[in-house]
Image: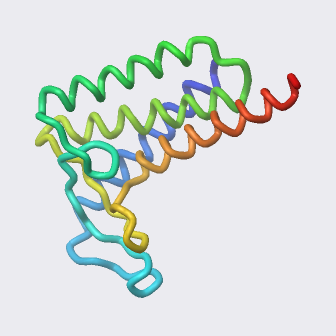
Amino acid sequence: MQTLLITILSSGVLSILGMLLADRFLTERIAIAGSLAGLHLSHNPGVAFGISFAPFVQMALILAALLAIVWMSRNVRGFLQQIAYGLILGGGIANIIDRLPDGLVTDYFQIGAFPVFNVADSCITIGVLILILEMLVWRRRKM
């Protein structure tokens, strides 16, 4: 359980720090690999991939998803699941904190035509991928 809490705190703090730095210093796009990848400040009113709902509905969905993850994380089986749930919860909490003042999430990583994203989004995605891979490996071992 200690790994879970450390992962929540570290992913949350890194996500919020990234958002604060982007808001403060990113005034124009910075190319990392030409037009393919770069840092580009964007403020997103929507949820995943910019999909938007009415503000009340959107916040209710976000909080419901976060509560579902908290509920599922109470039965973590091992180190990998603690890391995965910690990344998802830390990233989710950071995005909620970023959204509170103005209803917008600060995004700043741009790769190709993919929607602009942030560290919190990356944490959530990596956490979900870890859970999926762990589930597939666990299911395969049971066969």
For the point 22% across and 52% down, the residue is: 44
* Residue 17 located left or right of residue 24: right
Provide residue 36's location: percent of width, then percent of height.
Answer: 43, 80
For the point 23% across and 59% down, the residue is: 23
For the point 30% across and 23% down, the residue is: 63
Which residue extends farthest front? 143
Name the image quarter holding the N terminus: top right
Provide residue 68's location: percent of width, then percent of height.
Answer: 43, 18
Where residue 128 sits, quadrant-wise, is top right
Which residue extends farthest bottom? 34
In the depicted view, which residue is nearer to us: 20 or 38? 38
101 is higher (above) or lower (below) than 49:
above
Provide residue 3's location: percent of width, then percent of height.
Answer: 64, 27
Where residue 114 sits, quadrant-wise, is bottom left
In the depicted view, which residue is nearer to us: 38 or 45? 45
22 is higher (above) or lower (below) than 128:
below
* Residue 19 located left or right of residue 87: left
Name the image quarter holding the C terminus: top right
